[in-house]
Image (cartoon, rainbow, N blue to C red):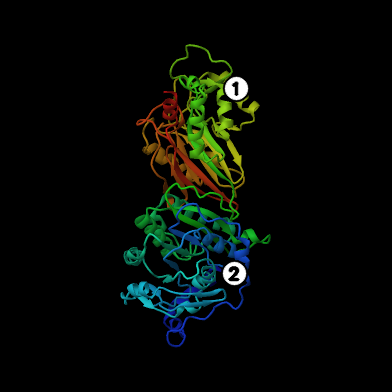
Amino acid sequence: MRRLWGLIWAIALLSAPALAQVPCPEGGAAFPPHYPSDRVFRDGLSQTRQVPASPNHVSGLIIPHHLEMPDLIAGGLRRATDQKPNRIILLFPDHFYRATRPFATTRRGFDTVLGPVATDPAAAGVLLAEAEFVEDSCLFGAEHGLRAVLPFLAELFPDVPVLPIAIAISATRQDWDRMADLLEPLLGDDTLLVQATDFSHYLPHHLARQRDQQVLNLLAAGDLDGLAGLVQPDHVDSTGALYLTALLQARRYGAAPVVLESRNLQQKSDALIAETTSYLVAEFTAPAADPGPVGLGEGPVYVLGGDVFLGRSLPRLLSDELVIEAVKDAALGATRGLPLIANLEGVLLPDMPSGLPELLLAMPGDLAIDWARRLNIVGFGLANNHANDIGPSGLAETHRALTSAGIPWFGPGQALHLPGVTIVGLSDLDGAAQQRADRLSDTDLDHLIQSDASVPVVAFVHWGREFLTRPRPREVALADRMRQRGVAAIIGAHPHAASEGLRAISGGDTVILHSLGNFLFDQMPPEASGALAEIRTFRQGTIFLRQLPLPPLYSVAKAAAD
């Protein structure tokens, strides 16, 4: 079937000039309605009445145009309905190869089954002045990439003019960059840039899920080179639209994507769909902004934190109610109270002996359990170089304390199974009295291979060197060996300082946040710092990662105590 589709596309490409001769309405009349019934549009609007507008300013959206998912189109657009854009720029693929230039637009308006949609003739004129690059086309009369979205715009954004831009499948990155230069002056603070595309096409669900995860990881990393290299239609039906959106959002607004839903058509059917389609909804807003509840059918959201150690000076500090409230408020403000998984750096003891060496990390078990409950910690990672500081008896006591309190834990090579994601702990340091680094073997890494391939795996790995926030050759090599075992993401700890930003490897197979640094640990900035990793899960078996800021909680405690 895919060979047949490829043949159809080849024939369409060869016959593009003939297909371009689509009659326009007479004179300057608007394009008539494309769909005879309003039912599917009304259904999508009805299904999403409870979807809230984003609490943040939204400068861009990614939505589908496939009417199999009217709730995703309507729900995505609803996220921007609290703002009144001065224009909407709509990017979508020229599905039928009707454009004879890299881009096409029109000054004509549109009638839809839910009302008229005006265009922006002046903005269209700016593009059409580049006559060898952008053509005035009649393809919009029957182009579903646009026409499936327009009725929703008529209902949700009445009287807002639209600048439609069809992107030729054959357009190149050079063309996209040139169009970005033309569009940037048209992107005001009140402009909404909408990418109307569907994602992986003509693949069974297990392959579609892999392609979708690659796209999600490249978006998470802001990797424009990676996005430009995606394959049409295996990843997305308009690589140009995706690239242009990501480029313009970063360049013009400094905005970052938050993926709100990642879905596949297979989820609507119990029968196997051999050649299915994927869909994505995202909003572009300030980096690390809280999107709040979404309500598009997405899965749970989790937060990963770095090193937690409540020994040495912290028991005394955390006995003060003012300090407790200050630290709790700062921590929950950063995690938003979401389920938290953190690295427990040290041993839990029922009674703290005096005279412990400075670098032997032990802490009162009751204090750690109390703070786990305050902060909604749903799992502690014990794959680190201090969990065994007091030997087997100390490790057993840590296990006992956590198990008795009902707090899940996972050690080296062990998995924490959560709805929507599996987190596997690994440590490249062995934690013995005479510590041995670079200890992870292929056998250890094989624990990343889980029996249920439909659940994404995140490696939570203790690696690197203290206060070094960039990967060394050792971590680069380890990351690739983890990628080969199918992990969607790698999140690191141990350096006690947070790295900046995410990076994707191997075309988006895996995304890496090298170091979370500290969550709550008795170390001060500027040497020490911390960050959070937000994991957004989706029911089709994909995830989206974001790095979030974390205030220095030890500094917060010290300041509250003074």
Looking at the image, which is closer to me, 255 or 425?
A: 255
Label 1, residues with CA under 10 Å away: few <14, some 14-19, many ≥20: some
Locate the N terminus by quadrant.
Answer: bottom right
Looking at the image, can residue 485 be seen?
Answer: no
> Relative to residue 208, is residue 390 depicted above or below?
above
Identify the residue shown where x is 52% and y is 41%: 336
Helix, strand or loop for disc 2? helix
Looking at the image, can residue 109 be seen?
Answer: yes
Label 2, residues with CA under 10 Å away: few <14, some 14-19, many ≥20: many
* Circle on res. 270: none
Residue at numbered disc 1: 396
Locate the C terminus by quadrant.
Answer: top left
Looking at the image, which is closer to me, 319 or 71?
A: 319
The extreme top residue here reads: 355
Q: Is residue 63 left or right of residue 528?
A: right
Amino acid identity at mark 1: Ala
Amino acid identity at mark 2: Phe
Helix, strand or loop for disc 1? helix
Residue at numbered disc 2: 41
Image quarter for residue 295? Answer: bottom right
Q: Position of residue 247 (x, y in %)?
A: 37, 58
Identify the residue shown where x is 45% and y is 65%: 238
Q: Position of residue 323 (x, y in %)?
A: 48, 26
Q: Position of residue 177 (x, y in %)?
A: 33, 63
Image quarter for residue 274? Answer: bottom right
Q: Position of residue 421 (x, y in %)?
A: 57, 44
> Relative to residue 528, is residue 88 depicted above or below?
below
